[in-house]
Every structure is written in structure tokens, then in C-alpha cells.
């Protein structure tokens, strides 16, 4: 049984439970909360999927995350110039003269959010991986569809709210 509690009641309960200074501090922390949207990808994904996701990243401010790069056919790691060219080619194909997608290579983000497949999408509060501070979904979809899923299906209200904000700012006007 799930009971929907109005937000106004939640804020009233908070106001009664917290001192005015604690309530103000809590609200300030919530306003300053550093929400991030991540798109987890791999260099072995189809180029058209990477271009579409990079386009979504450019529009929304989401961060494209790579776990790393595979070794070359000779067993040597891919060098930095190859990585830069890979990212440049995708950004050029998706964004031309518009704002390029933001990219990071960070295996720790894959671990932090328990990402085991790509593409994966995460909406997260700060750098936490605590229940309620992030949601993860996998699937061959656009970021807009992942955000709709979060906004409608995440079990965490804060994630639903944040996903709706990102979706509305980046994609709602296109429908």
C-alpha cells in the first residue's frame, strides 16, 4: 500500500521537526545540490548510437562516460590521440558548430553507479551512490526516453523531479 503525501504536508512536518536554522540549511543544501546526468557508453557501440547520444548530451548537459578503451589489435592500449580523435569525430558528427558533448573516461563512475551494460543512463545527486540519490536504467534508447522513464518510474521522488526538470529544459519543446 502506497500513500501519496502532499509536498506541502512534508514541508510542514519538516518545519515542525527542524529549527528555523536547520530548515533553512536543509533547503539551501537542496538548492545547491549538484545533480548530474550521465550517459554510459562504449567505444564498441554503433557509431550512429554514439552520435545520437552525444547529441542528447550536448542538448541536455549530460556527461558521456567511457569506462576506458580496448587494447589495439597488437595488444597495446589505445593512445590519447586516438581517444581524442574518436571523441572529436563523434562530436563533429552530432553537433557541428553547436556545443560539443562533454566526455569523461572514468571507470570509477561505472563502479559507483553499478553500471554493467551500455548504454546506461544515470541521474544522480552529487557523487553519492546511496539509495534515493540516483537511479539507473539500461536500454537502446535516447536520453529523452531515459529521462521520461526516470520521471515516471523511479522509486525516488527526488530523481523523478530532477529527471523531469532536465527533460523539460532539453527536450520538451521538440515534441
Image (cartoon, helix red, strand yellow):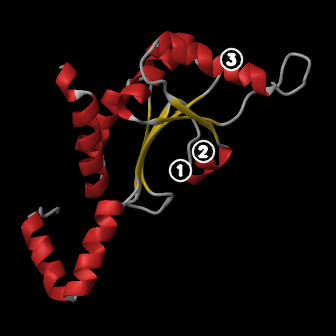
Instruction: State the mark number for residue 85.
Output: 3
Q: Position of residue 81 (x, y in %)?
A: 76, 22
- Using the rendered view, name the quadrant where residue 118 is placed: top right
Task: Label 1, secondary structure: give it.
Answer: loop
Q: Name the residue rendered at 31%, 28% in the picture.
A: 145
Per the image, label 3 sits on a secondary structure element best described as helix
Residue position marked by numbered label 1 in the rendering: 113
Q: Which residue is mark 2?
A: 110
Of badges 3 and 1, nearer the viewer stands 3
Q: Nearer the viewer, residue 46 or 61?
A: 61
Q: Residues within 10 Å of mark 3 (few under 14, many from 20)?
A: few
In the rendered image, the residue lying farthest to the front is 97
Q: Residue 63: x, y in percent?
A: 49, 37
Q: Are marks 2 and 1 in contact (CB under 8 Å)?
A: yes
Q: Earlier in the sequence, mark 3 or mark 1?
A: 3
Q: Is residue 50 visible?
A: yes
Q: Reply above or below: 18 against 168.
A: below
Contact (Cβ within 8 Å) of mark 3 with mark 1? no
Amino acid at each position: 500500500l502506497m500513500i501519496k503525501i502532499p509536498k506541502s504536508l512534508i514541508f510542514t512536518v519538516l518545519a515542525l521537526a527542524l529549527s528555523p536554522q536547520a530548515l533553512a540549511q536543509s533547503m539551501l543544501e537542496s538548492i545547491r545540490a549538484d545533480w548530474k546526468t550521465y550517459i554510459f557508453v562504449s567505444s564498441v557501440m554503433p557509431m550512429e548510437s554514439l552520435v545520437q547520444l552525444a547529441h542528447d548530451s550536448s542538448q541536455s548537459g549530460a556527461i558521456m562516460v567511457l569506462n576506458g578503451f580496448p587494447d589495439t589489435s597488437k595488444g597495446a592500449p589505445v593512445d590519447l590521440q586516438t581517444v581524442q580523435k574518436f571523441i572529436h569525430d563523434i562530436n563533429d558528427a552530432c553537433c557541428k558548430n553547436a556545443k560539443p558533448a562533454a566526455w569523461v573516461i572514468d571507470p570509477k563512475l561505472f563502479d559507483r553507479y553499478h553500471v554493467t551494460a551500455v548504454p546506461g543512463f544515470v541521474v544522480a545527486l552529487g557523487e553519492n551512490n546511496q539509495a534515493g540519490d540516483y537511479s539507473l536504467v539500461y536500454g537502446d534508447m535516447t536520453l529523452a526516453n531515459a529521462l521520461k522513464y526516470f520521471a515516471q518510474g523511479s522509486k525516488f521522488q527526488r530523481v523523478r523531479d530532477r529527471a523531469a526538470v532536465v527533460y523539460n529544459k532539453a527536450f520538451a519543446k521538440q515534441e
